[in-house]
Amino acid sequence: MGIRNKLDDQGNIVRNKARLVAQGYCQEEGIDYDETFAPLARLEAIRNLLAYSCYKNFKLYQMDVKSAFLNGIIQEEVYVKQPPGFENFSRPNDVYKLKKALYGLKQAPRAWYDRLSSFLLQNGFIRGKVDTTLFVFEKGQDCLLVQIYVDDIIFGATNDSLCKKFSKLMQGEFEMSMMGELNFFLRLQIKQCQEGIYISQSKYTKELLKKFGIEEGRTVSTPMATNVKIDKDEKGKSVDESKYRGMIGSLLYFTANRPDILHAVCLCACFQSNPKESHMSVVKRIFRYLKGTIQYGLFYPKNEKFSLKGYSDSDYAGNIDDRKSTSGSCQFLGDCLVS
């Protein structure tokens, strides 16, 4: 039995979840499952959708499928034993044959995606050729865009009546919870206003500062000192490798809407195999910078520009250890940074 809480952007408990979870680690490939791959939307795809909504000047909404994986129909023959607390004492050795997926099964994400995509295609949607988690429905001059991220669905249309019809269509097929305008998704706080869309991660920032014990202390004005050159520091004192990797992993997710720390984080990520105190001090400086810039984020203005532009820059032979070059690039749709 799996139990967890669903939170909103303020950290308040929206609802409690409890579900029956299968022991998927006992499954054997070729017997209990074959294909397990299910497409997953990239953060760049989410940002592209946000940029397009600014360009076309329409609002984005979100809905959540309740117990999404339980809707997937599995093709394989799978049996599960009786769950604890729900045994049939008169037939203790009997097992259940599954018709639909359970949470924990390796093929559950794939089965859910197949069920949802088939339903959308049957109702006139066109699946994206590059991004297979994007579905488009066109009616005359209007279009409805639907982005799928497992059980979370983001959608918006140039005509609001298409959104209402889509919501009714989905609620007629699946058990849904309509969550209104898009405001909190993948730990991104999204504020849609008349001037454009503002994306931030202030809640996530506070959680990380508390998790790694960097709530106290002074802040800094830059993520990395300009005169610091990081190298392997082979003679330096080693630090906790798992903690260092945890901090780097958290910061890498942060770069989704904080390009100002991207260079410093990627530089520190090169030393995860054998981190030293000198590397840890640079990572802690990034956190102190985040502490002083909690409200920073990306702003997508509403305008009529939607041309794709790219910029790149390189630091040739800048690596102290192996003299490799470091390159970086960014892409804009209009005035919106998407990658």
Image (cartoon, helix red, strand yellow):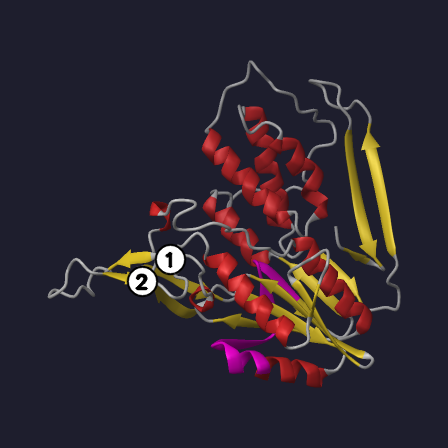
Where are the magenta residues, as a range? 169-190
Left or right placement of residue 166 versus residue 142 in this view: left
The residue to which callout 1 is attached is 77
Left or right placement of residue 180 versus residue 241 in this view: right
Q: Distance between the residues labelled 2 and 1?
A: 7 Å
Left or right placement of residue 94 versus residue 16 in this view: left
For residue 235, above or below residue 154: above
* Three-letter residue code for mark 1: Glu
The residue to which callout 2 is attached is 97
Mark 2 or mark 1: whose residue is earlier in sequence: 1
User: Looking at the image, which residue is at 30% across and 59% down?
Assistant: 1
* Helix, strand or loop under label 2: strand
Query: Label 1 crowding class (10 Å Cα cut-off): few <14, some 14-19, many 20+?
Result: few
Task: Work out whether residue 9 can be spotted.
Answer: no
x then y, percent, for residue 254: 61, 48
Q: How many labels does the image show?
A: 2
